Amino acid sequence: VNALQYDAEGNLRHLLTLEGMPRARIESLLDRAEALLPHAHGGTGLRSALAGLALCTLFFETSTRTRCSFQLAAQRLGMDVLNFDAGTASLKKGESELDTLNTLAAMGVRAFVVRHARDGAVAELAAGALPGTVLVNGGDGRSNHPTQGLLDMLALRRRLGRDFSVLRVGIVGDVRHSRVARSDIHALTALGCREVRLCGPASLLPGEGEFPGIGTSEDLDATLEGLDAVIMLRLQRERMEQGLVPSLEDYFRRYGLSRERLARLPGHACVLHPGPINRGVEIESTVADGPQSLILEQVACGLPVRMAVLQTLLATSRGPAG
Ligand code: CP
């Protein structure tokens, strides 16, 4: 993946993963996003930055936040945006996903944000895409969601400061099936986070040895001890049908972030969740909507992060596709 992600000079050609991304590159994307914040929310000064270029959101899975914020980010930079509808496309006639992508690239679309249920699918498309086309992984399987990882780091940094070496961060819930957890772990590790703790039922924790040096626990109360930030993950309801979780009520009792549990965290501690949230399953409404919640701040950070990613990729990509 890294051979695809970078060109011969080490510039970002696609954004597929945060795994192995150097700290300096993550920090430079976050700095760029922070500088773009005023333009992301209401500013119009950058409408000519990428004018004349086109972006397509090529989603083979549902999305609200990722798709809409990429659309807005591209529009803030003056791009034309196509929202591809997989349900009514010639995919239904048997056209392959790669032929679909390259057909759109031949129309002049330079950048694609792709979401796919299958691990590695976005990298495979990047490998076959026409030269000069840039791809952003909008989430593949349980593997990667790099812009979510970046926006989570920006939200954390804005609330708790730039020095991750003093932070203890917990990630709670269905870590095993979560691409957000993986991208957050890659980013937190690269940024030198003091400690990352993973917590959930054994059936939803990652396999032995996947994250060397990162502690796992089935005990949420012990995990929360002294955390500066806790990232709650969505419980996908099919996990209950698969027998990985006994019941939603039991899950909330053991792994839900309630007001009582939050009160045991330090006063400065903050709560993140990538959304969509299941209120009353992994997080109580009063916590999700309370002053320690960064959930909507995360959404707001998504816009400048995605602008920064598009600017970075399109500044370094070579020539038009086709
Ligand atoms: N956090 C996230 O990826 O949300 P969407 O599925 O709504 O894009």
Image: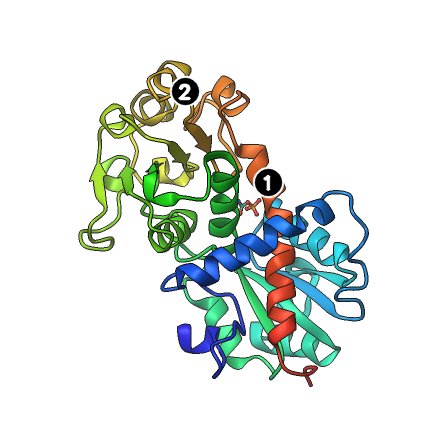
Does residue 190 appear left or right of residue 300 in this picture?
left
Q: Residue at x 42, y 78 (%)?
A: 3
Assess disc 1: are there few (<14), some (14-19) or many (≥20) residues with their C-alpha within 10 Å of its C-alpha: some
* Label 1 SS: helix
Amino acid marked by disc 2: Gly
Q: Quadrant of the C terminus?
A: bottom right
Residue located at (65% from left, 56% from top): 307
Q: Residues within 10 Å of mark 2 (few under 14, many from 20)?
A: few
Counting from the top left corner in percent of width and height, residue 217 is at 21, 35
Task: Indicate whether 19 appears above or below 237.
Answer: below
Q: Nearer the N terminus, badge 1 or badge 2?
A: 2
Locate residue 254, reporting x and y percent.
29, 24
Q: Is residue 12 above or below residue 320?
A: above
From the viewer's perspective, is the residue at label 1 or at label 2 nearer? 2
Label 1 CB less than 8 angstroms from ligand 1? no
Between 228 and 94, the one lying in front of the other is 228
Q: Is residue 165 among the parts visible in the rendering?
A: yes
The percent coordinates of residue 212 (x first, y second) are 20, 53
The answer to whether 107 is drawn above or below residue 160 in the figure is below
Q: Position of residue 96 (x, y in %)?
A: 57, 75
The residue depicted at 45 percent of the width and 44 percent of the height is 162
Quadrant in the picture for the N terminus: bottom left
The residue to which callout 1 is attached is 299
Q: Which mark is residue 61?
A: none
**Residue marked by disc 2:** 267
Badge 1 amino acid: Val
**Residue 18 visible in the picture:** no
